[in-house]
Amino acid sequence: MRAYLDASALAGRYVRERSTGRVEAILRDSSSMGTSVLSIPEILSALCRRRREGALSSTGYQQAKDALLEDVTDAFIVPVSPPVVQRAAELLEAAHELSAVDALHLGSALEWGAQLFVSADERQLAAAARFGLPTSRV
């Protein structure tokens, strides 16, 4: 199974959350993982914020960052290409509640041929389902 994880889902691998176990189970059952190139700066931003707020030590930050960068070497990283942007525009026109980044994630998943869309965002999951993607909430 080709599982596409948006940044909200993938972040569960690097910071212990209630979703961590679910993310790990999905990845064990998947033949490949895909995510947008946007996920990397999105996750790094969240890690930096946690470090600034004191919820993550400098060592914890570095370990999480290293794990993220190692994981993306084995993942399919979907670029923000013209076909992805076109899909995102179509999604935005059809599902007005999506943000631009959410639409880019969905466009990326569709262009990659994801068989499962994984997110912690209920609106994004609902939109993915409307556009024919099987979904899983983490």
Image: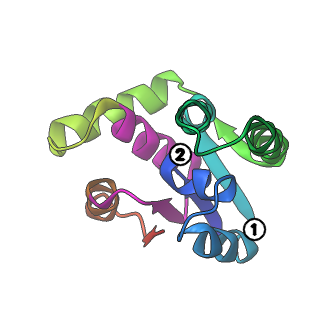
In the image, residue 48 lies in the stretch drawn in magenta:
no
| The quadrant where residue 107 appears | top left
User: Farthest residue toward the front?
Assistant: 54
Please state if 77 lies on the left or on the right of 60 as rendered. left
The reply to whether callout 2 and callout 1 are in contact (CB within 8 Å) is no
Residue bearing the label numbered 2: 7
Which residue sits at x=75%, y=48%? 75
Q: Secondary structure at mark 1?
A: loop
Using the image as rendered, state which of residue 63 and residue 115 is in the foreground: 63
Kindly identify which residue carries mark 1. 31
Question: Which residue is more in the foreground, 23 or 61?
Answer: 61
Residue 29, percent across and down? 71, 77
Position of 60 with respect to 124 (left or right) is right
State the SS at label 2: helix
* Mark identifier at residue 133: none
What's the distance in space between the residues labelled 2 and 1, CA to CA?
A: 19 Å
Residue at the location (23% across, 36% down)? 92
Number of callouts in the render? 2
Q: Amino acid at mark 2?
A: Ala
User: Percent from the top left, x then y, of residue 88?
Assistant: 35, 34
Are there few (<14), some (14-19), or many (20+) residues within 10 Å of tag 1? Answer: few
Q: Quadrant of residue 85?
A: top left
- Span colored in magenta: 101-122
Q: Is residue 113 left or right of residue 32?
A: left
Which-is-in-front pick, marks 2 and 1? 2
Vertical placement of 28 versus 80: above or below? below
Along the line of sight, the residue nearer the viewer: 18 or 37: 18
Relative placement, left or right, of 8 versus 63 is left
